[in-house]
């Protein structure tokens, strides 16, 4: 047993820890989901609630997950089993594994769309693009019964290949080099978008707070997005935490990851909304928003097509590194708890993702092959997203907060988060403890009760 833990791979340095964790957080959530939800749910008001969720829910849960992971050095199920053997707490881990699958089913589909846009941009499909053409391009991309699935297969293949190479060679190397490049490219996008005619309307859409837009569903969606964004509530950060170095300052890592991730989301919003308003498009256009605006942002500028290719290449990379962290949850679980080899665990997961994920892909849009098949008014694609982001991740987060607040000794927490007293962060840990014990659970419960109509916040 001891031997198995000693032989476990891990990240090699503090920098690697930071970039790998950031690589999990930054992904389609920033460039695809954050802008389209902000567009659909009212701009600045949604952004404000989202930021509050990051501070009072996201950050404390991220730190809790880091603690659980690094203390136990185990996968998501094994970690709870080690801390509280034979208790129902380890069902948090199993729920996390289920949530990770639901997310992978639709995430691999959207990642496939992004990959296909690289190919289209290289082929020159976006030359002379107009808002109408951008619309039809997107519709034809997602409605074909064959191509999106083929791209999804490619995504799953790439993710699996990296995962088979292991934690250090695979995850670490890819994230460390490419995250900074993505950041620079989004800034180039921003400069272009903010110099378009009428761009100020997009700017004020993102930052002007209209309190009348704050309804129960808006708040629940912002909360779900915070979980999805920071990869929380399903044990991804427990799994990654288990690979952290012993001397990592986890409070700092959590802060730096949450801040950097939020900056990337806001920068993505600043690239997309000015373009939406400048080209007379609809901010509430839904999941196609990214795909319809970015080709327009780069139209009619010098080297526009090259920038477009670079943008989608880097977005593909961000989607891939985020997806790697998702698949790592069941892979670590299967290989450590069920005794199958890492390679086999990756391959089994690849098959599961593709079989069920292709159904998500075929239902991504009302006019897709399975688009007419709905449950509670939602397509399969939307259902996977809704159940994972808005239900399972927040419930997982609530249970994790309760676990830390009520089933963990405060001294253990202090020791682990201060690296056995080496770091002088007593005060910060005290504040974290109060938030995670009282504020985070209460907020989560209020949002839930509000969303199912038991109480009325607005
Ligand atoms: N945080 C990723 C993103 O915003 O794209 C998505 C994600 C990754 C969610 C890993 C959950 C997860 F475990």
Image (tube, rainbow, N blue to C red):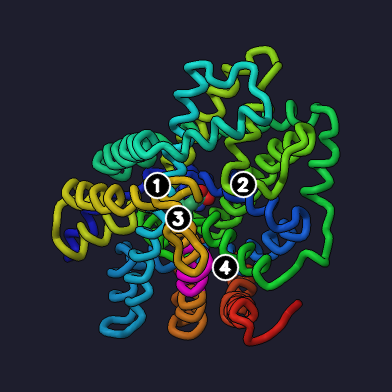
Q: Which residue is mark 1?
A: 369
Compute the Cα span from label 1 to label 2.
Answer: 39 Å
Residue 71 is situated, as x and y percent measured from the top left of the image, at 38, 67
**Residue denoted by label 4:** 60
Q: Does the residue tagged 3 have its C-beta within 8 Å of any atom of ligand 1?
A: no
C-alpha gap between disc 2 and disc 4? 16 Å
Residue 355 in the image, given as x and y percentages of width and height: 27, 50
Mark 4: few/some/many CA within 10 Å (<14, 14-19, 20+): many
Where does residue 441 sit, x and y in percent of width and height? 58, 79
Q: Which mark is residue 372?
A: 3
Please state the extent of the stretch shown in magenta in the rendering: 388-397
Sooner in the amino-acid sequence: mark 1 or mark 2 = 2
In three-dimensional space, the C-alpha distance between marks 3 and 2, rounded to whole angstroms, equals 39 Å
Comparing labels 4 and 3, the label whose residue is closer to the camera: 3
Under tag 4, what secondary structure? helix
Q: Please name whichever residue, 393 or 292, is drawn nearer the observer in this view of the structure.
A: 292
Quadrant where the image shows the C terminus: bottom right
Magenta segment, prevailing SS (helix, strand or loop): helix
Q: Within 8 Å: ligand 1 and the Cβ of disc 4? A: no
To which quarter of the image does residue 202 belong?
Answer: top right
Q: Residue at x 84, y 46 (%)?
A: 204
Question: What residue appears at the point 71 percent right and 64 percent down from the top-left corner?
Answer: 49
Q: Which residue is the site of mark 2?
A: 260
* Above/below status of 149 relative to 433: above
Q: Quadrant of the N terminus?
A: bottom left
């Amino acid at each position: 047993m001891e031997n198995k833990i000693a032989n476990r791979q891990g990240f090699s340095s503090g920098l690697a820890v930071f970039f790998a964790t950031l690589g999990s957080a930054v992904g389609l959530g920033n460039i695809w989901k954050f802008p389209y939800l902000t567009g659909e749910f009212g701009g600045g008001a949604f952004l404000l609630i989202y930021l509050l969720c990051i501070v009072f829910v996201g950050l404390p849960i991220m730190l809790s997950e880091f603690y659980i992971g690094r203390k136990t050095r185990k996968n998501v199920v094994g970690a709870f089993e080690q801390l509280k053997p034979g208790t129902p707490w380890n069902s948090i881990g199993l729920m996390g594994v289920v949530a990770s699958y639901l997310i992978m089913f639709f995430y691999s589909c959207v990642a496939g769309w992004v990959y296909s846009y690289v190919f289209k941009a290289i082929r020159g499909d976006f030359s002379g693009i107009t808002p109408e053409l951008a619309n039809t391009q997107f519709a034809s991309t997602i409605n074909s019964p064959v191509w999106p699935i083929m791209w999804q297969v490619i995504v799953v293949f790439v993710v699996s290949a990296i995962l088979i190479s292991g934690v250090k060679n695979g995850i670490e190397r890819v994230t460390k080099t490419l995250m900074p490049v993505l950041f620079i490219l989004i800034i180039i996008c921003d400069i272009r978008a903010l110099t378009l005619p009428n761009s100020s309307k997009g700017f004020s859409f993102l930052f002007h707070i209209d309190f009348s837009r704050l309804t129960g569903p808006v708040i629940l969606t912002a909360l779900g997005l915070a979980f999805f964004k920071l990869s929380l509530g399903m044990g991804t950060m427990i799994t990654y935490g288990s690979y952290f170095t012993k001397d990592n300052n986890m409070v700092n890592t959590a802060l730096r990851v949450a801040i950097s991730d939020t900056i990337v989301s806001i920068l993505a919003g600043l690239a997309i909304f000015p373009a939406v308003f400048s080209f007379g498009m609809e901010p509430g256009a839904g999941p196609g928003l990214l795909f319809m605006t970015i080709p327009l942002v780069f139209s009619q500028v010098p080297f526009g097509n090259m920038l477009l290719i670079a943008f989608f290449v880097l977005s593909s990379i961000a989607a891939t590194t985020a997806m790697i962290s998702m698949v790592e949850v069941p892979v670590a679980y299967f290989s450590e708890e069920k005794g199958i080899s890492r390679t086999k665990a990756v391959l089994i997961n690849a098959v599961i993702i593709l079989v069920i994920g292709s159904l998500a892909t075929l239902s991504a849009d009302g006019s897709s092959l399975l688009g007419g098949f709905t449950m509670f008014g939602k397509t399969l694609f939307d259902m996977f997203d809704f159940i994972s982001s808005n239900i399972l991740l927040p419930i997982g987060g609530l249970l994790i907060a309760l676990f830390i607040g009520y089933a963990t000794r405060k001294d253990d927490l202090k020791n682990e988060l201060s690296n056995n007293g080496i770091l002088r962060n007593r005060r910060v840990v005290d504040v974290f403890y109060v938030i995670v014990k009282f504020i985070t659970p209460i907020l989560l419960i209020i949002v839930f009760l509000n969303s199912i109509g038991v109480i009325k916040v607005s």
